[in-house]
Amino acid sequence: MYITITRQHPDSTYNPSASDFVDYLEKENEGKHPELAGHFFDQYNDRVDAKTVVKEIDANTAKLKKREPKFYSLTINPSKRELRAINNDPALLRHYVREVMKDYAAAFYRETPVHVDQLKYYAKIEHERTYSGKDREIQQNRPYVAKIAKLRNDIRKVELGELMGDIGKLEKEIATHQKEMPHQVDGKPIAEGMKKQGEQMHVHIIMSRKDAYNRYSLSPGSSYRESEALLNGEVRKRGFKRDQFFEAAEKTFDRLFGYDRNYVESYQGRKTLGTNPYQYFAKIAGLPKNEKALALKLMGKAGVKLPLPPQIPKSKLDLMLKSLKKIKKGIDTARGASSIEI
């Protein structure tokens, strides 16, 4: 489960309206009959139209400065394994989102706990994804794309008389590089903008920066981590407990759907990989046989194939850490591909 939190993308000032972002989230409805279109939803309503979303978010910005974000985006990205656990059912995913928003509210660090009813948010389930430059498949195809582009440029120069060469031979080289591309779909190389295959259901949430009553700010941004400040002579709690939220979101999914989460799927595992690779590797090495096998399989799907020894010889630590960097790169690529910037 990859959950990202992104603030409204800044320009010279922040766009006073959420309309551009809402339009982006409406892209899957283009060309669909109104009865088949997907709808926004909130904590209690299953069908909220896009105009209402824009109106409600835009009106909920009291006392925010021009250079302050008006809203945040949460993106909930279940893995294919997690989607299979809920039978790829949008209704179950919608139920999960509503429970997660309770975890989100509880993660704010305040004297008085924040309740989910104090949040103003609207969520939208999407069923499609397209490949971007962040995806492993695009990155690994890129060297071949560059070679093909050079060969095509050489053909153009030969045709113009600027370069000596055999066009037929150059075209054969292009065909060879196209066949050698490691990632293809139905014989066509995967390129940016192509739709991804398989289950791709995920959720975008637009979250007002202000509470539902337009009185105070609820910011989950990185500069608003859990802290205390002196205000009018009193110590006040403020900020957002990000680790608590990410861990609670996973536990909520596991509790609701009886999901048996593997260590490499966990937020704690990914965090340990970034801060202490040796400990991460040792944890995987110590997993029961079946869990270890699943861990390796999941890492392979993230773009990393690494045989895992049952023990960790200290003499090979440097080699192991080098391999861990490859694991981290693969997992970070998979995680990075799940986020968007508004």
Image (cartoon, rainbow, N blue to C red):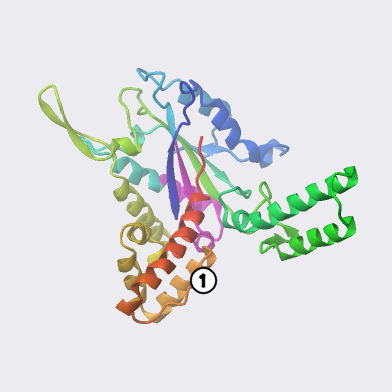
- Give the vertical position of 242 relative to 282 (above or below): above
- Give the vertical position of 171 relative to 12 (above or below): below
Q: Which residue is mark 1?
A: 305
Q: Is residue 272 magenta?
A: no
Q: Is residue 201 left or right of residue 116?
A: right
**Picture coordinates of residue 318, whole percent (x, y):** 36, 70
Please state which of residues 48 and 132 is positioned toward the viewer in this rendering: 132
Residue 179 visible in the picture: yes
- For the N terminus, the quadrant is bottom left
Please state which of residues 131 and 291 is positioned toward the viewer in this rendering: 131
When asked about the image quadrant of residue 39, the answer is: top right
**Picture coordinates of residue 4, whole percent (x, y):** 44, 45
Q: Is residue 50 left or right of residue 13?
A: right
**Picture coordinates of residue 190, whole percent (x, y):** 69, 55
Please state which of residues 302 and 107 is positioned toward the viewer in this rendering: 302
Callout 1, which amino acid?
Lys
Instruction: Please report the residue visible at 84 percent of the width from the left and 45 percent of the height from the top.
Output: 157
Q: Is residue 49 left or right of residue 29?
A: left
Element type at mark 1 = loop
Q: Is residue 205 left or right of residue 230?
A: right
Disc 1 crowd rating (10 Å Cα; few below 14, some 14-19, many 20+) is some
Magenta segment range?
73-98
**Picture coordinates of residue 59, whole percent (x, y):** 45, 20
